Amino acid sequence: MAEPGSVGVVETQYFTFAQDEPFRLESGATLSPVTLAYETYGQLNADRSNAILVLHALSGGAHAAGYHGREGHLPGWWDDCIGPGKALDTNRFFVICSNVLGSCYGSTGPSSIDPATGRPYGLRFPVVTIGDMVRAQVRLIDHLGIPRLLAVVGGSMGGMQALEWAAHHPERIVACIPLATTARHSPMLIAFSEVGRQAIYADPAWNHGDYYDKPQKPDAGLAVARMVGHITYLSEQSMHEKFGRRLQDRERYGYDFQTEFQVESYLKYNGNKFTRRFDANSYLYITKAMDYFDLAAPHGSLAAAFARSAHVKFLVVSFTSDWLYPSYHSKELVRALTAVGADVTYVDIQSTWGHDAFLLEVDTMTRLLRSFLDRLVREERVAPPPVPVPHASS
Amino acid sequence: MAEPGSVGVVETQYFTFAQDEPFRLESGATLSPVTLAYETYGQLNADRSNAILVLHALSGGAHAAGYHGREGHLPGWWDDCIGPGKALDTNRFFVICSNVLGSCYGSTGPSSIDPATGRPYGLRFPVVTIGDMVRAQVRLIDHLGIPRLLAVVGGSMGGMQALEWAAHHPERIVACIPLATTARHSPMLIAFSEVGRQAIYADPAWNHGDYYDKPQKPDAGLAVARMVGHITYLSEQSMHEKFGRRLQDRERYGYDFQTEFQVESYLKYNGNKFTRRFDANSYLYITKAMDYFDLAAPHGSLAAAFARSAHVKFLVVSFTSDWLYPSYHSKELVRALTAVGADVTYVDIQSTWGHDAFLLEVDTMTRLLRSFLDRLVREERVAPPPVPVPHASS
């Protein structure tokens, strides 16, 4: 038996398409074939109306819930909120999470083999957009035989994808839940992205993206990029609470350039750890996709972008201490959605955790998501899935 | 004749001390000799009571006003506020600005020659503190024969030095004007410092600080460090106003990794420009000095740190959009100063310019500084200097 509240041991699956007809990107470039890594939790109901698509942020992957390998080992990135009885209750919903195009976690990206050369794409991989990521997800949802998703939900870049679904594929969703995000990447976000990219470019081991068969990877540059990112996910207050000015393994100042403050040690440790799990080129491509994200620009206004989304039910959530995606971005979004007559619930959650709050405020998020989904189930008369068969633990 | 409002063409001067008896640092290490680069503007009055010491920020130097070389060429970093009729009126005050210990602008620092080896110090240079910088300035003020400064004034790291004067050399000042600063470097500030340092360490050309005689300098790492810093000096709103999502030299997205947004171009240009004027090792040493700055810790509380400063008159200024040194840091400082009975004027200026506001809000700063200094002149009966002799332009 799986532990209570866990979906248990899960495996990533792979869906490959565009083998014959290439997948055309917003840039005009094409990709063939395209693979998406994905996982599913729970069961689809008889009329396929209980599916929820979970969308991940910059460094996430398809593994959102349960464990890889064995019980308790490598939990999914949103295991706090996905499982039997949890916010996204897998006794009621069929939950899907797909790794984005351009990533390094099983979906086609710059580290994938380019069929034209038999070698990893590197910088020959075409630049992809949030729109491209979502159009690939539409193909996956088609493949799974789901006519309409009950909800799309995600935070940060996941929220951008959720909004992209609502703006450009509204007929395929009932509800959209963007968390701690924006409909339009701000110049400050672009600035932080670009600093991260410059740190990678500056690493000689990056070698213009051509490092996959080299002994040295651009780990130093990627670690600096991650450290910059990491700071922006926290708040000044959470750093005070978490680290203060405390020293690590020292009683007093060392008067040298060793890592000595706890906050330095934490950032450095996590920056280095990140290089063992993420690909520097994927970092470039995904941050670029985020920088390009601007739902308003092609339509003239944000309201125009959601012209076809009046029937979509929105739960928009922001966090008071999120200075990377400040609440006023969500408020602008809410104004545009209200202008087109959409049904919008907006909550600005008091939190000291900064941008990361969408992952850390589990109790609040559970209450909010549960009551919103309850309402959807009631209004859309979503039938339960077949009674789950208890699965043996591995 | 100098142009109106300008102090005209000026020259940097040098004061060298500790040739015989080494200068002892907080760390216990010693330096010998120590040179400080400095400039002065205006004239000392008969009783030497009209001197104001201007203290610079991380990347500043002694050249605060007027021009180097020829009229209109290389203005000082605070030329907006220093000159005849300006906020720090050189017709009334004798204004001094000294480059800090550890810098690369003429004062002794890691790029100076180590007399022990005949080669640049590099990382053999001892780590210095804000306290060390200020004790060196005390030596300069002694050398200039000034018993008591009318005021010490500075923003950011300059404000830390001003507070250090007030806490540890209160008998040498009448007034203290800390702008956009803190009495205790926060974990977020340490985090941003450390990311900048890690970017420098990650550059192979840094070579553990030993690059002065090498053809390549750690410019790539220093540029990334500067880019990170630069973002933190702005506000989200000022970036919206200044850059928005506008592209540079392009009509539409290039779907490549060229610099394309104006904000990217601005940061990259300034990052690269910085490497032509600043030394990477000085960046390490000066950020480290800032990280160590915590007036409260050795005394148990901030109020205890200012126990001897009750007679000092303070003008504390913060800026509403400064998220690097948020207003609440200044408010904590004001509470501590009030607790010891000091005379404190506090202004939290509404500004959209972020941390850089202390340099950019010239009109507001001019009004504030002028009225505060007028009050000092009145209360301290500061006599005017001798009538200035018009000097020929060069």
Image: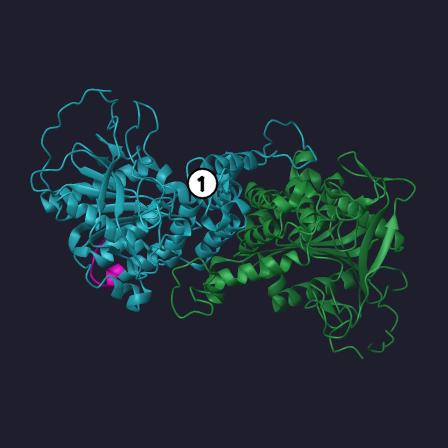
Chain colours: A green, B cyan
Q: Nearer the viewer, residue A278 or B151?
A: A278
Residue A122, image quadrant: top right
In the image: residue B262, left or right of residue B301: right
The kind of secondary structure element at disc 1 is loop
Residue A140 is one of the magenta-drawn residues: no
Q: Nearer the viewer, residue B10 or B297?
A: B10
Q: Quadrant for the N terminus of chain B, please.
A: top left
Residue found at x 85% / y 40%: A116
Q: Please provide percent x and percent y for residue B54.
A: 26, 42
Residue B344 is one of the magenta-drawn residues: yes
Q: How many marks?
A: 1
Label 1 packing within 10 angstroms: few (<14), some (14-19), many (20+):
few
| Label 1 chain ID | B
Q: Is any atom of residue A293 visible in this view?
A: no
Extent of the magenta region: B337-346
Q: Residue furthest right?
A: A20
Residue that mark 1 sits on: B213
Q: Residue furthest bottom?
A: A1
In the image: residue A341, left or right of residue B156: right
Q: Is residue A38 above or below residue B223?
A: below
Q: Please provide percent x and percent y for residue A368.
A: 65, 64
Q: Is residue B86 above or below residue A338?
A: above
Q: Is any atom of residue A133 visible in this view?
A: yes
Q: Is residue B94 above or below residue B191?
A: above
Q: Quadrant for the C terminus of chain B, please.
A: top left
